[in-house]
Image (spheres, rainbow, N blue to C red):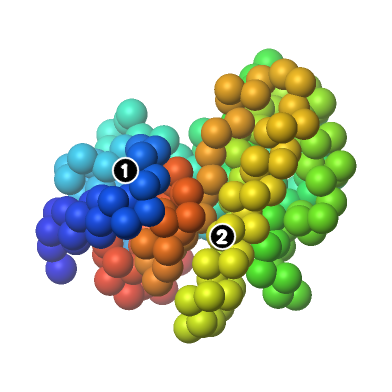
Amino acid sequence: MNIKDNVESVKECIANAQQRSGNKTPIKIVAITKTHPASVITEVKRVGLDTIGENRIQEAENKFPQCTESLQNITKRLVGHLQSNKINKALNLFDTIDSVDSLKLASKIGSKAIFLNRIIPILLEVNTSGEDAKFGFNPHNIDEMLACFEIQGIEVQGLMTVGPLTSDNKRIRDAFISLRKLHKSIKSQLTKNVDKFTELSMGMSGDFEIAVEEGATIVRLGTVLFGRRQQIY
């Protein structure tokens, strides 16, 4: 496995998808290092990526102390479901919470952030596929999402979704189109901090090119960079 070559291949695919679609927005690659050893984070930094994503608090607690030096100047994003009883740990470990899936959770993060005298960047996770197993705001509950912008202690920087688990590219594309349109709708209703609400995190190893074609600003990539996951934690 040559991560550097994989990164270059991904960047080429992203550039081609941008050319096909006219999406000129710079695309941020979040290297999903979950279930991979701490040494992978060191390799991520070596090949020039500056952002990682993890799904589980416990895994990050175990892994991050093993690569403290490599984590310097690396943005650490929590992309997995966050239980409210683990908010304190999450804020200690991560720079952003990309999986805020309810108004209640957003409020609790805001309260903890105020106590810590911090402002926490977040993304609102939206269930655009309608799959019962997925977390996220119902895309029709715009009022709840708009209410998150009024919470002190957090800064809503964009939306996130997980594409449907299917080989049907139309269904996948429809889920990403839905997020893009929702982002546009929410942005049109904001009265402040509009310039901060810029991110569309969508697309993983199997569907990131479709996501880029539909306006993604962030793609979350693991397998395509590192190969199959290793169950080590």
- Quadrant location of the C terminus in the rendered image: bottom left
Q: Is residue 78 above or below residue 213?
A: above
Residue shown at 69% from the left, 55% from the top: 126
Q: Is residue 59 left or right of residue 181?
A: left
Rounded to the nearest angstrom, the CA distance separating label 1 from label 2 is 34 Å
Say what amino acid the circle numbered 2 marks: Phe
- Quadrant location of the N terminus in the rendered image: bottom left
Q: Is residue 126 above or below residue 175?
A: above
**Percent x, y of residue 79:** 55, 52
**Percent x, y of residue 78:** 54, 47
Nearer the observer, 149 or 70: 149
- The numbered mark, 1 or 2, whose residue comes first in the sequence reads 1
Nearer the observer, 212 or 38: 212
Say what amino acid the circle numbered 1 marks: Cys
| Element carrying mark 2 | helix
Disc 2: which residue = 176
**Quadrant in which residue 177 is drawn:** bottom right
**Percent x, y of residue 61:** 50, 48
Nearer the observer, 79 or 202: 202
Q: Is residue 34 left or right of residue 127?
A: left
* Mark 1: few/some/many CA within 10 Å (<14, 14-19, 20+): some
Tell us which disc is closer to us: 1 or 2.
Answer: 2
* Marks 1 & 2, CB-CB < 8 Å contact: no
Disc 1: which residue = 67
**Percent x, y of residue 99:** 63, 50
